Amino acid sequence: MTKIQNLIGGRFSDAASGHVLDNLNPATGAVYSRVPDSGEEDAAAAVAAAQAAFPAWSRAKASERAQRLRSLAALIDENLDALAKAETTDTGKPLALSTSIDIPRSALNFRFFADAITQVANESHATDDTALNYTLRRPLGVVACISPWNLPLYLLSWKVAPALAMGNCVVAKPSELTPMTAYLLSKLSVKASLPPGVLNIVHGTGAKAGAALVRHPGIKAVSFTGSTRTGAEITRVASPLFKKLSLEMGGKNPNIVFADAPFEEALATTLRSSFANQGQICLCGSRIYVERPIYEKFKTGLIERARSLKIGDPLEAGTDQGAL
């Protein structure tokens, strides 16, 4: 039974309350790890650690911050197999998907923003030769990154990497349903010699840990991916405090197939966009509109291909559809 811990100020700790949450393997229904049920006290400690680390991290040279992120990306690559297995065990997605997309893309996120931060430019504009207006891009301070369960490390790194690259310090709250790769990332961040307090990871529910971060006065910005209802609640709480918000609240998209579309390509793309990650991606097509002249042919072809998908153990090679 794996015991997951929070990372606060460079140290691993349980929730202040001592309470834990069960983490289930969706393919078997078995509890295989325990997650800290963090709350107000844990969130406050993480914000305090981030605030203490912010002055030095924000003043560090962009090249130094970039090097730290590249080191973290290299460690993700080195631990690809372990991270992919953890992601599959936590989410139920096929191991082939975790290995080929989720974990490599997570490393790429850190590399991309490590490169990007060395290319940031400021702007100046002259006004009728009487004034000079200029724009400086500076870090905000401590930011909260709240990520969802469907692409756990992929989307967490997409939030954390640009925030750290810019010189902000982060308190991240991964989904309590899929916390394992965030926990492994916290271990790798220590190994990469990320200064204590620069990246803090607090585990727990949105209603407790997440809400505590959103309303904390020391949090300057919130990046959230999840449900529309939760996003609306974050807006209600954070807006009067003038926090900067980035809200990606998902959705579902229709596929539109016209009669003159390349038939085989449209069929293959529709299958992939409908069933990838068990259909648990906000951009997966959940409705398919087909122009009448090819409707029957397309419907028959899609049903045949869907029936050919292999449903099974996410850890087994050749599995197309794992567990929800």
Image: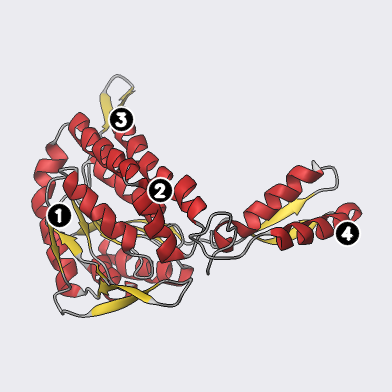
- Disc 1 marks which amino acid? Ala
Q: CA distance from mark 2 to mark 1?
A: 26 Å
The residue identified by callout 4 is: 296
| SS under mark 3 | loop
- Disc 2 marks which amino acid? Ile
Q: Nearer the viewer, residue 277 or 120?
A: 277
Identify the residue at the far front of this view: 316
Mark 3 vs mark 2: which is more N-terminal? 2
| SS under mark 4 | helix
Mark 3 vs mark 1: which is more N-terminal? 1
Q: Nearer the viewer, residue 185 or 172?
A: 185
- Disc 3 marks which amino acid? Val
The residue identified by callout 2 is: 103
Q: Which mark is residue 50?
A: 1
Q: Residues within 10 Å of mark 2 (few under 14, many from 20)?
A: many
Q: Nearer the viewer, mark 3 or mark 1?
A: 1
**Residue 260 sits in quarter:** top right
Q: Are marks 3 and 2 in contact (CB under 8 Å)?
A: no
Mark 4 vs mark 2: which is more N-terminal? 2
Residue 201 seen in the figure: yes
Q: Which mark is residue 121?
A: none
Counting from the top left corner in percent of width and height, residue 298 is at 82, 55
Q: Nearer the viewer, mark 4 or mark 2?
A: 2
Q: Nearer the viewer, mark 4 or mark 3?
A: 4
